[in-house]
Amino acid sequence: MSQNRQSPKKFHFFENKWMPSASSPLWASLKITITYTIFGVLWILLSDKILLFVSSSADQFYRISLYKGWLYIMVTAFLLFSLIYKRIKTDYDLTRRLDLQFKSLQKAKTTLSDNILELKTREYELKASKERYQLLLEGVNDGIWDWDIKSGIFIVSNKFFEILGYEVLETPHFTMEEFEKILHPNEKNTVLNQIYAYLDQNMTLYDTQFRLKTQSNGYIWVQNTGKAIWDSEGNAIKMVGAIKDITDAKKTQDKIEYLAYYDHITGLPNRARLDEVVNNLIAQKHQVGLIYLDIDNFKMINDLVGHNQGDLLLKQMASKFHDLKLHYYMLSRISGDEFGFIIIDFDHEDTLIELSEQILKIIRTPWTLIGREFHLSCSIGISYTPDHGDTFETLFRKADTAMYASKNNGKNQTTVFRDLLHDEILEYVELQSNLKNALTAGEFELYYQPQFNMNTNEMIGSEALLRWNSPDKGIIPPDRFIGIAEKTGFIIELGDWVIKEVCRHIQEWEERKLNYGKVSINLSGVQILSSAFLNHIDEIFAAYDIAPKKIVFEITENVAIDDSITTIAKLEALRALHFEVALDDFGTNYSSLSYLKKLPIDYLKLDKSFVYSLGQDDKTGAITESIIYMAHRIGLKVIAEGVEKLEHMEILKKFNCDFAQGYLFSRPVSKSDFERIYLED
């Protein structure tokens, strides 16, 4: 209680509220007045007494009093001066200090005002900058992110959420774990490895593309770029970057890549993609085999039914090839009518050959387009590592060489590359380049092989056979250049020349009244399917005035079956003009006796492969006899080719074969020898 009791209030004069401050003007005035009063009182009380004590006379007293008065004035004047001077000096010093302080305060005020103005200016600029930055963030298409690596927190812009379709959060941040959850599973490890490789400074630039999950559980492609900050010890402490939605650009890029690496008709990888894949496989130490095929005479399909139907046929083929997918690694449409199969890590070359045989079988299957049936074949070339090269270009070049060898050897077959093929292809190219010049230079000539009646042994006609008499290479048989002429289209011009030459010879023989019988002329499939074929026939025979009944046009089984509707129409037109038609090489390909009755033909030429086996194989004999019998039943006459032995002739007579030709009777001979031996007396 005593501690809480207040002490009694002491009263003191100097504590009176009326007591002036020692530094106030009132106090200074009182101080001077009191001092002067005290001094005056003391002077008055004491000076006279002292004066009386020391004065000896009135006169001395008077003088001393006078001096006393002056002294008083001087002393009081000095005293007043001292007091006033001290006061004034104190006030002056105080005023001066106050003035200096005032000036200092004014200066401080000015500086403070300037600082306040600068702070307000900076505050305004910062606010404006912040507003501009916010407008920038909202205006750009990129989502900005700021990653505090130590805390693992991502702070992102509103655009970041908008890109992913999420609602903008009041606190726009999330953790690394949440970021990992929206990464595409197939790319998660790659993305994280790239980030940490960059943070470990194993990458100089962080710029990558990946997919992020959206609010709708779909995925979009983003491009993510960033820049990190490291401390003095090389530890990453912060990373800032941006994501950009590149889904549309990625789709465009994928489309461009598809166009660059895939065939738009079949959807198969193209040659560029095949090149890339094969070289990668070789780099990975895989054994690689290439089966390269070219559809024989595919141009005929485009010419007959149009390119749209031709493209449809290619799609059908690609679909059929997929049935073999367990046997190959990759299928490619290399170009036009060319396909490539890639096989890896096979045991033996025979594996490639067996697959190529399955491919040939697929191609041989009849194909139907707009109600018309086509029979096709293909030529195949094979090459493989390491025997034939260690790059795609080398493998392709050698497979191409092997494929051309298949074409030159009659098509519809497979050839595995061998070193000698190179020389054969060089010869092929040389023949191709010399063909047209050979016709102009008169290097072609016709040979004739006589045909005989099996019962009377009389010559009933001959077959005109084309020979190329090259100054450099001598006689070149037709099987070495006819295929080249067909592939280049030169066969049409060459075929017209053959027909004209036969007409010229017949005209000459008739003028000489020689009995030449009938002349058979071979027609190429390319030639007969040409739109101008019938017009050329009309023009040529009108020019030479040759009776059509003197001519037999021969077509092969393949020509008759390929695009049978067009072929039948052309053959019917020939017969309407009174030409006769023979089906050559019967029995070599798609033999069908039931099909024969559809063809407007007069003769069936039995292929020499049947004749060779007569007398050695009972089955061949039985088949041959049946063919001749059935041909006679549908009104056809039969000509046997390749008769070389008397035994063959006797058996054919027994089978009632009508006519024959072959080395037993005569080899093909020149026009002059034919005339001398068979036409002249």
Image (tube, rainbow, N blue to C red):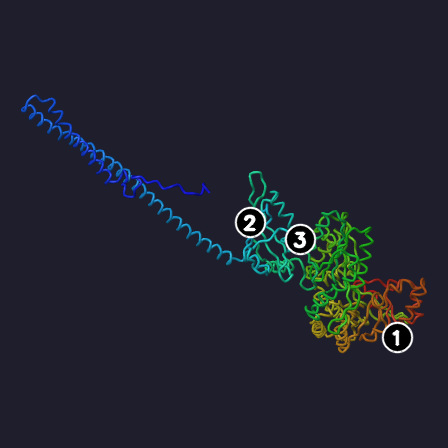
* Precedes in sequence: disc 2 or disc 1: 2
In terms of image quadrants, where is residue 201? top right
Q: Label 1 crowding class (10 Å Cα cut-off): few <14, some 14-19, many 20+?
A: some
Residue under label 2, please give it: 240
Local crowd at mark 3 within 10 Å, few (<14), some, or many (≥20)?
some
In this view, which residue lies farthest toward the left?
A: 59
Mark 2 or 1, which is nearer the eye? Answer: 2
Query: Mark 2 and mark 1: span between their CA atoms?
Result: 93 Å
Q: N-terminal of the two: label 2 or label 3?
A: 3
Q: Amino acid at mark 2?
A: Val
Rendered view: 291 above or below 113 = below
Q: Give me the disc on residue 632.
A: 1
Q: Given the image, on which type of amino acid does mark 1 rest?
A: His
Q: Nearer the viewer, residue 616 or 318?
A: 318
Residue 275 position within the rendered picture, expressed as x and y whole percent measured from the top left? 69, 53
Q: Quadrant of residue 358?
A: bottom right
Q: Residues within 10 Å of mark 2 (few under 14, many from 20)?
A: some
- On the image, the x and y values in percent for residue 457 come to 89, 69
| Residue 438: x %, y % from top left | 70, 59
Under tag 2, what secondary structure? strand
Q: Nearer the viewer, residue 87 or 489?
A: 87
Q: Quadrant of the C terminus?
A: bottom right
3D distance between C-alphas at marks 2 and 3:
21 Å
User: Which mark is drawn over residue 187?
Assistant: 3
Kindly check if marks 2 and 1 are in contact, taking CB atoms under 8 A apart as contact.
no
Label 3 is placed on what type of residue?
A: Glu
Q: Is residue 266 left or right of residue 631?
A: left
Label 1's element? helix
